Amino acid sequence: MKKWQSACVQMCHTCSKVASACTCMPLKKTFAQPTIPSLLFYHPDTSRAESKVIYTLKHKDNRDLFDFLAAELYPKLEDLLSELEFDVKDCILTFVPRTKKAIIKNGFDQGERLCKRMAKKADAICLPLLTREGGKE
């Protein structure tokens, strides 16, 4: 937990904001903006707390970790929706599905698991509204 809290105040090398407030993406990553700030400083070196959390999220079906991350991310989601004048309870939460190959390899879809935990915390609905087509399988 100490390492995680330290990682939360680490400065982004691109925008110089603390990791938990960063809305930019790591080098060589391009995603639609705006994002929910969520500690995306992933690096395969799992000795770093934030990398270990993301690695475990993607490769281990750890219920406690999903609950922990939902608790960490929920206030940020609530703040973002509040700024947009939405109530999270009136929203449908969805996720980008994992590739079939990754689901077969790891046995689960981490986006779906996290989305369900977030929806439960928000007393909202989680639905699989997106599909994955093309791209790397």
Image: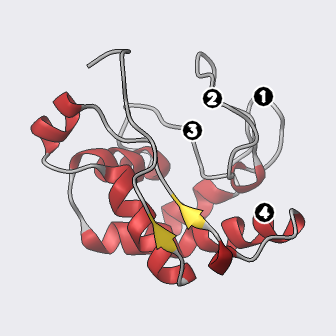
Q: CA distance from mark 3 to mark 4?
A: 20 Å
Give the residue number, with chain letter if any, for mark 3. 41
Residue type, label 2: Phe
Q: What's the mark number on residue 132?
A: none
Q: Secondary structure at mark 3?
A: loop
Between discs 4 and 2, the one toward the N terminus = 2
- Mark 2–mark 1 Cα distance, whole angstroms, equals 15 Å
As drawn, the label of residue 80 is 4
Secondary element at image label 2 = loop
Looking at the rendered structure, the number of numbered marks drawn on it comes to 4
Percent position of residue 19, x then y:
69, 49
Q: Does residue 66 sit above or below 22 in this rendering?
A: below
Specify whether 17 is left or right of 59.
right
Q: For the residue marked with disc 4, what is the amino acid? A: Leu
Q: Tag 1, which secondary structure? A: loop
**Colour scheme of this structure image?**
secondary structure
Query: Which x, y percent locates residue 33?
Result: 74, 36
- Could you tell me how far apart the alpha carbons at marks 2 and 3 are, in whole angstroms? 14 Å
Is 109 positioned to the left or the right of 117 in the image? left
The alpha-carbon separation of the residues under discs 4 and 1 comes to 21 Å
Which residue lies at the image location 68% right of the left edge and 52% below the top edge?
Answer: 36
Image quarter of residue 103: top left
Nearer to me, 74 or 137: 137
Q: Residue 9: where, in percent of width, then height?
A: 70, 57
Q: Quadrant of the C terminus?
A: top left
Point out the tag, 3 or 4, that comes first from the N-terminus: 3
Give the CA separation, mark 3 to mark 1.
11 Å
Residue in the picture at 56% in, 65% down: 92
Q: Amino acid at mark 1?
A: Thr
Label 3 crowd bin: few (<14), some (14–19), many (20+), radius 10 Å:
some
Of the residues under marks 4 and 1, which one precedes in the sequence? 1
Q: Which residue is mark 2?
A: 31
